[in-house]
Image: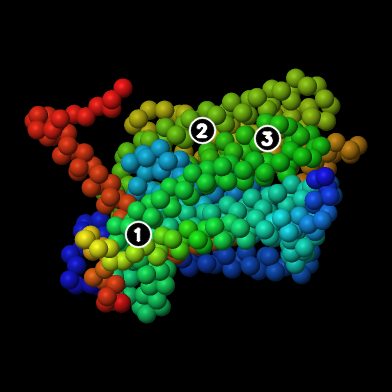
Amino acid sequence: MDRTHRESDLERTVLGPLRKTSMQFWLVIAVLGGLVLMGAVLLGRQWTTGLGVTGLKRPIYWGVYISNFVFFIGISHAGTLISAILRVTQAEWRRPITRIAEAITFFALILGALQLWIDLGRPDRILFLFFFGRFQSPLLWDVTCVTLYLLSSTLYLYLPMIPDLARLRDRMTDAPRWRRRIYTVMAAGWHGSHEQHRRLERGISIMAVLIIPIAVSVHTVVSWIFGMTMQPMWHSTILGPYFVVGAIFSGIAMLFIFMTIVRRAWHLERWIKAKQYDYLGILLLVMSAFWGYFTLSEYLTTGYSSLINEVQVLLAKIQGEYAPWFCAMVFCNLILPFAILIRRKGRTPTGAFIVAVGVAIGMWIERYTIIAPSLTRPALMARFAIYTPTFTEVGLTIASLALFALLFLLFFKLFPAISVWEVEEGQAVAAARQKAEELLRQGQLEPTLPTP
Amino acid sequence: MAHWIIDATGGGSVIVAIVALSVLAAYGTMLRWILTAPWPEPGRPQGENEAGREQV
């Protein structure tokens, strides 16, 4: 550590977990690592014996893996979109949570892409998309958008990290050599000059504006993979915005889950405060209402169409074998958020965490009930099919979630969970504003109004 | 016309490659612009990380 520098409370709190690692942390890592290992074994078995170990068979080509893909791509909106919107609107309360949100996006996108690979019977054929892809296919649109989103999200995560990486390079001098090397390389010679800060903030602003349409395009195109087919309850114009709303909804939920875990485990209670839970809770409620509105529109329109193929799928969802899933989805996504978050007292870390876990489960179920019922009752089949996920599919889903959590925790063991320089900047802005208000009250400062 | 363009570009793979390379080039240029800001700036106070930088 650089002894000549006196660390602020914020620095001490944020850099503390990077210096010391508790036994519990390694225990959690071991459990998650074990689950990931289990997933690797299951995947190896699937590759050697074929997709017969899953419940996937004609006409059910997509199942749990594609539900996971849509789910992970959905939660990737946590981050970047929420962080970008809050940055563009200059919401000051965003500062302590943007890093967590951006990291969720980065890892969720990697896990999302991984699901597509898992879903293939022949993993080497993923390259066919690049070699023999046809732009008429929404699958290639999806590859383009997701790749663009991953590139942009990586840069959007990295840019605001640069000043903190330079801080780590300068302060963590007692860290192991390999870590210091990482900090030095990633800090890329940052020296914190005024001009560099000005350019950095310009770059972050450009990325924040760019990333919003990119994120919207990603989930719209994911929905078009379904919407461009003639399957019942997929071929719908509402699917694009429905998916985008669902993605932001599940993204906020995932942000709540991870910010609560990091806040508790990294002792960041002084920085991630009631205000973040209150405001994000309101945002989650708004998205819950939007989700309910889109779901109602989708189901009501389908029900009134009286088209036999469409109605069969609808009935399977609301009173057939998928009815328990449907009820659980409505409870998790609509009833639970409103029951707990509607009152200010409910918008606490505990309340938000419970709702967020519920919404994450509910949104996974939503993806599953979009995919499975339509494929078990396809338009051109006389008989219904049955889809039952196997242990391999459930195991790989658990392993994917474990890998997501593992990458997230390891990342924040190496890098600060809070953007220190941005929070410091926020503190400076708040102090300057308070001082100006004081001077204004004392009459020592003339209020300047814009000339008409 | 659209089909002709797609066929002429290897089914779209070339389009994906051009998009990816253009984006990478644009992002790379922006990163370079940020990191190569003049330093130290004449007449300005030194940056917060300067002291530490010298030690590494």
Q: Position of residue B10 (x, y in %)?
A: 80, 59
Dot 3: what SS? helix
In whole angstroms, how far apart are the C-alphas of marks 2 and 1?
A: 37 Å
Q: Earlier in the sequence, mark 2 or mark 3?
A: 3
User: Which residue lies under the disc numbered 1?
Assistant: A196
Same subunit, tags 1 and 3: yes
Of all chains, the one bearing label 2 is A
Q: Is residue A182 above or below residue A209?
A: below
Disc 1 marks a residue whose amino acid type is Gln
Q: Earlier in the sequence, mark 1 or mark 3?
A: 1
Q: Earlier in the sequence, mark 2 or mark 1?
A: 1
Disc 2 marks a residue whose amino acid type is Met
Res. A239 mark: 3
Judge whether residue A120 can be spotted in this image: no
Residue A181 horizontal side relative to residue A375, left or right = left
Of all chains, the one bearing label 1 is A
